Image (cartoon, rainbow, N blue to C red):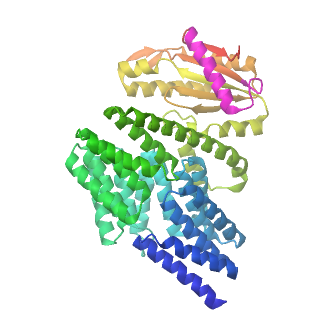
Amino acid sequence: MKDQRSIVDELLDECDRHTNQYTGKEMSFAIDALELSRVLQYDIGMYESHFRIARSLMANCNNEESIKHLDICYSIANKHKDKVRIARTANSFGIAYYNLGVISKSLDYLLEALEISKSKDYPDIECRVYNNICSILTELGDHETAMEYLFSLLSKCENSDSEIFPKCIIYRNLGHTLHLMNRVDEAETFANKAMQESIMNKNVQMLCESYYIMGEIRASQKNLSEAKEYYLRALALANETNNSYYLVQIRMKLSKLYCENNSYDAAFQTILSAYNFAMKLDYPVLKRNVSLSMADICQITNNKEMLIEALTAYKDTTRVLEEETLRRQQVFTKTQLILFNLKKDNERLRNEIERDPLTGCLSSRTFPDRISQTISTCGDKGSLIFLDVDNLKTINDSYGHDAGDELLKTFSNDLINVFPQEAVKIRISGDEFIVFVPKAGKKETVKILDKLIDTLAKPRMIGPAMMPVLVSAGIALYPDHSTDIVSLKKMADAAMYSAKQAGRGGYRVYNAF
């Protein structure tokens, strides 16, 4: 039995070797290890085999299939109360759901992995989790918090006696985040560090991504020839490592660059290659992005047939993303409260992610889960109000976006103060907010809304001028109008639009007729 298990371990080692050499043969070794582990009823062998299969599937953007294997890993690790493997699996779940665009579920798994790795002192896993959380923070636009964690992570690695996490990955992420913050010189410094570290450690994947970031930097500087050179270097390495994501992403960037050089045939052929490849992948966000890029280039080249196909793909993928996100959030909300009892620092991190930094209201990512939670704890009655700040566009156009931000801050301050503490206040988009007031009927809601409008009517300094805040609102009642939160939002939105049409600064209650 022992000798047979050693064969499993050898197969897993061979799998890892082929993974590091990008031969594309790693999956067959993992499958062989899994089959033998099943015969031997060797749980750890099954865990490690499924984990490597999941890793390979994820690398090829087959995230749904990857999650199936991670589910088995999670079950085995919990059966043996193996905290290291539970944390590893939770971290990988976080990556897979992030790739699928299910951000809330991704964060829940990453925070679970973070709690275990910190409490049990697994510094290597802790570093990987923090790095993944930083990637999400960067995508969500919270660059300052991402930078804070990345520099903390870099310090932890530099002060460690052993290598607990590759510094080239941190340098790469610092370069990427700084570029998004338009701190170009600093971004280039860290991108160069990432390249040097990647070359020194023979990390081909990070070298590919570092070249890509340098291409982004040169493109932003309008140095198109150097940008093209870096993109092509990155593309060659993406081919070498079979990195599906970057094979699509780099071609998208190259097609845009060709358009800027008026090389429309090259642009179309490049984006067509990216589009056809992306459509074979289980990566909805990437499919949506490449469809939009394809549509943009088809408009420029007047390719109407392909334009229709690309726009249809964009619409379909967007709908799938929205439906999948909603479905997973609704299912997961029922269990997440009993699954995790996170420490204070993890709760602070969650709060930073779920809060809109400008207004202090909850972000749109919390809809509809927070309202569903409120209904389950505060009773089965309430009102949903859809609010639109009428004069934000005028302020932005007249006095600039800083003045517009002041308007949103003073509006949200009054909103938070006027509505009861238990009301759920969410910023949906730029000038749109929703508030769910538990236990409130029409009479109570109208009373609160009248008070808000009166409060907002008082002039305050916005930019260089004294002015009131004008708002239009619509009301829909739970459960009178609907018991579905998404439908309720649409009803309140329709009522708000009716109020706006009748003259700004008022509100309407939803009426189906």
Q: Residue furthest right?
A: 379
Q: Position of residue 215 (x, y in %)?
A: 28, 51
Q: Residue furthest top?
A: 502
- Asked whether 290 or 348 is in front, the reply is 290
Quarter holding the C terminus is top right
Q: Residue visible at 58% across and 42% down? A: 320
Q: Position of residue 132 (x, y in %)?
A: 49, 57
Quarter holding the N terminus is bottom right
Q: Residue visible at 56% across and 14% down? A: 500
Confirm whether residue 186 shows in the render.
Answer: no
Depicted 60 relative to depicted 50: above or below: above
Q: Is residue 283 magenta?
A: no
Q: Position of residue 204 (x, y in %)?
A: 35, 67
Confirm whether residue 302 shows in the render.
Answer: yes
Q: Residue visible at 62% across and 20% down? A: 494
Side of 91 where 338 appears, left or right: right
Q: Report the span colored magenta.
A: 477-502
Tell me where residue 190 sits by quadrant: bottom left
- Asked whether 229 or 120 is in front, the reply is 229
Depicted 435 relative to depicted 40: above or below: above
Depicted 490 relative to depicted 446: above or below: below
Side of 390 where 111 appears, left or right: right
- Asked whether 503 or 49 is in front, the reply is 49
Q: Main secondary structure of the magenta part?
A: helix
